[in-house]
Amino acid sequence: MKEIIITNFEGVYEPAEDSWLISRHIPKSEGNVLEIGSGTGIISIHLAQRGHQVTAVDLNPKAVEATKFNAKNNNVKIEVLEGNMFNPVKNRKFDMIVCNPPYLPPSDDYNDPELALAVEGGPSGSEFTIKLLTQAKNYLNPNGSVYMILSSRMKEFEVDWKRKVIKQEKYFFERLNLLHFF
Ligand SMILES: C[S@@+](CC[C@H](N)C(=O)[O-])C[C@H]1O[C@@H](n2cnc3c(N)ncnc32)[C@H](O)[C@@H]1O
């Protein structure tokens, strides 16, 4: 993995264990990539360094600014779009969709609305992930697939995808999994 220099922006999710898990362990593949929820851009930059054509989407305008800044600073070209999940890429298709989603149930710990947007995935923590997986096939080429982080703190759910755990990391408060949905 090449070195990536990330500048953190106020109001933008700072890369953490989940960001590094997906960046370090996503298997090598071909094709164009869509990242939903790019934050500082760490995952998109890593994939662009590998040679993928990358489109990054975030709902938080500060994250869009951060991804653009960090992409330029790391000498990679990334298309960065502001908007809600798949809205900015209507009628487009990708070979891979990646996402380190907001996955926690709501709590009083996150009063800051931008941090809440980055970490809270709906009443059970899983709603954002289920919505993304339910819509993802409309934006994938045949044989396209999805890589996402899932946490043991989310409620378990069923979706119409096969799934494989690529890598699991255990912390004292949760288990993080990098999942391949195919
Ligand atoms: C856990 S952070 C991950 C950030 C970065 N990918 C990383 O791994 O460090 C989730 C990101 O999703 C963005 N987000 C939340 N809801 C979104 C939505 N509906 N559409 C697009 N992005 C969203 C947040 O603004 C935040 O930047």
Image (tube, helix red, strand yellow):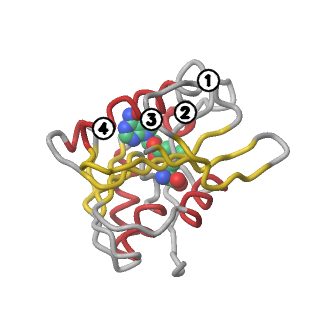
- Please say whether residue 11 is visible from this viewpoint: no
Distance from Cα at disc 3 to Cα at disc 1? 26 Å
Amino acid residing under circle 3: Trp
- Specify the label residue 87 is tagged with: none
In-front residue for pair 49/28: 28
**Quadrant showing the C terminus:** top left
Distance from Cα at disc 1 to Cα at disc 4? 28 Å
Distance from Cα at disc 1 to Cα at disc 2? 8 Å
- Specify the label residue 106 is tagged with: 1
- Residue appearing at x 34%, y 46% in the figure: 61
CB contact under 8 Å: marks 4 and 3: no
In-front residue for pair 178/75: 178
Residue 117 coordinates in the image, percent (x, y): 49, 34
Drawn side of residue 137 relative to residue 180, left or right = left
- Specify the label residue 137 is tagged with: 4
Element at label 2: helix
User: Which numbered disc flags the more N-terminal residue, 1 or 2?
Assistant: 1
Residue wearing tag 3: 161
